[in-house]
Image (tube, helix red, strand yellow):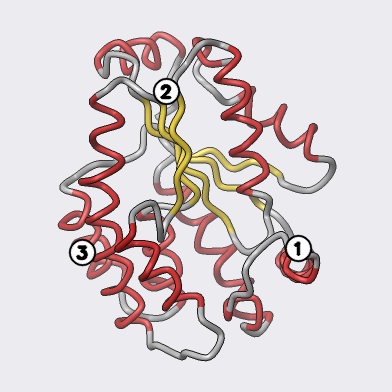
């Protein structure tokens, strides 16, 4: 099922303007860059925008992020998942739900879909188990629209490493995962998009940032373009 323009209008009206957009994808696909561009674009249209990230967004969640991305640590998939879900619960209750209630547009760099792919599919924890824990942690709060930025994994990892070397990002143990890991992540997100076409849009992330943003903008509800 594809959501048509009049259906987007109904969704926006029902939420009194609050709208939840998430960005997903593998390492180095340009999520942060495109979120900044979209936030600036929506600001020019007079919308109040909250930009956040997962794991992160609250002191508890940022502490969990430091543990999860620390190259010196090697948690297994289930440990990763428990840390993420604790961070997600705090993030939803303290940041996401209040902002949406205020009628803001929330842009999040990752959300529950990342756990479904990274821990459920790739780390082998199991999709059904992750989906259930996601539901408990979020209280059923789902994005209205999700962009999966799709890029060849080798190119994405190269981007991520160059960014980190330039001091524009934080070193992450995920960058050092083998090539097969990153390919499975990409496949996982594409599979997720096939399973939820009413919500998930796959956007080619190769090329100049301006061109990628135009692809994203074309997929927005008309009221936000």
Q: Is residue 104 above or below residue 174?
A: above
Which numbered tag is attached to residue 163? 1
Q: In the figure, residue 207 lies in which quadrant?
A: top right
Please name which of the two marks, 1 or 2, marks the residue nearer to the observer.
1
| Residue 214 x, y percent position in the rendering | 72, 27
Describe the element under mark 3 as helix, strand or loop: helix
- Residue 67, visible in the rendered structure: yes
Describe the element under mark 2 as helix, strand or loop: loop
The structure residue drawn at horizontal position 59% and vertical position 75%, both measured from the top left corner, is 172
The structure residue drawn at horizontal position 27% and vertical position 65%, both measured from the top left corner, is 85
Q: Is residue 82 left or right of residue 189?
A: left
Given residues 193 and 172, the one toward you in this image is: 172
Spatial separation of the CA atoms under disc 1 and disc 3: 32 Å
Q: Which residue is mark 2?
A: 3
Spatial separation of the CA atoms under disc 3 and disc 2: 27 Å
Q: Please tell me how crowded label 3 is: few (under 14), some (14-19), or many (20+) other residues with Cα within 10 Å.
A: some
Please name which of the two marks, 3 or 2, marks the residue nearer to the observer.
3
Q: Which residue is mark 3?
A: 133
| Residue 218 x, y percent position in the rendering | 64, 22
């Amino acid at each position: 099922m594809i959501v048509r323009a009049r259906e987007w209008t109904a969704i926006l009206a029902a939420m009194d303007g609050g709208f939840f957009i998430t960005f997903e994808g593998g390492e180095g696909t340009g999520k942060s860059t495109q979120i900044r561009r979209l936030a600036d674009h929506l600001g020019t249209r007079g919308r109040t925008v909250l930009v956040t990230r997962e794991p992160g967004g609250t002191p508890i969640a940022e502490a969990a992020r430091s543990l999860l991305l620390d190259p010196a640590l090697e948690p297994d998939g289930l440990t990763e998942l428990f840390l993420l879900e604790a961070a997600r619960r705090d993030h939803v209750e303290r940041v996401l739900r209040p902002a949406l209630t205020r009628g803001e547009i929330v842009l999040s760099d990752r959300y529950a879909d990342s756990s479904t792919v990274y821990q459920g599919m790739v780390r082998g924890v199991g999709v059904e188990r992750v989906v259930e824990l996601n539901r408990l942690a979020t209280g059923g709060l789902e994005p209205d629209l999700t962009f999966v930025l799709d890029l060849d994994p080798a190119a994405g990892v190269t981007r991520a490493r160059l960014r980190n070397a330039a001091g524009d990002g934080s070193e992450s143990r995920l960058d050092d995962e083998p090539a097969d890991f990153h390919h499975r992540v990409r496949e996982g997100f594409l599979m997720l998009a096939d399973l939820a076409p009413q919500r998930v849009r796959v956007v080619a992330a190769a090329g100049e940032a301006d061109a990628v943003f135009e692809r994203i903008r074309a997929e927005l509800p008309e009221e936000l373009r």
